[in-house]
Amino acid sequence: MADNPEIRGAQDRSRINLHQDHEVRYWTKALGVTEDQLRATVARVGSSAEKVRAELGKGHASG
């Protein structure tokens, strides 16, 4: 199913989709990073939220 921009949280919390503005806003707030930091980290480790959190030292995703 395609992402619905009316839904405020990330559609699939296991992946970070940098092509959806609402997801970029969600992840930057959830991880406490800037958009540039988020994009650079995804470029290094891929779109797995778990890998991005680990790279940023943010631990594992919760619920």
Image: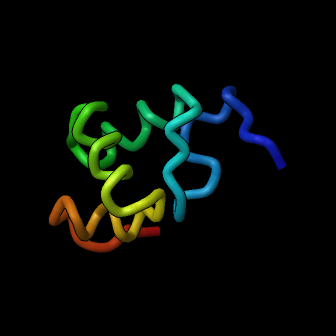
Instruction: Residue 5 in the image: state x and y as whole percent.
Output: 67, 28
Q: Residue furthest left?
A: 57
Q: Is residue 15 or residue 40 the one in the foreground?
A: 40
Horizontal side of 60 relative to 34 (left or right) equals right
Task: Residue at 35% x, 69% y: name it.
Answer: 51
Instruction: Residue 6 in the image: state x and y as whole percent.
Output: 68, 27
Q: Is residue 54 or residue 32 the one in the foreground?
A: 54
Picture quarter containing residue 62?
Answer: bottom left
Task: Residue at 53% x, 29% y: name it.
Answer: 22
Q: How many labels does the image show?
A: 0
Horizontal side of 36 relative to 21 (left or right) equals left
Q: Which residue lies furthest to the right in this view?
A: 1
Horizontal side of 5 relative to 54 (left or right) equals right
Picture quarter containing residue 24?
Answer: top left
Question: What colour scheme governs how the chains and residues are painted in the rendered image of this protein?
Answer: rainbow
Instruction: Residue 17 in the image: state x and y as whole percent.
Output: 55, 44
Q: Is residue 3 above or below residue 63?
A: above
Task: Residue at 64% x, 49% y: name it.
Answer: 11
Q: In this view, does 54 lie above or below 47?
A: below
Instruction: Residue 31 in the image: state x and y as whole percent.
Output: 27, 49
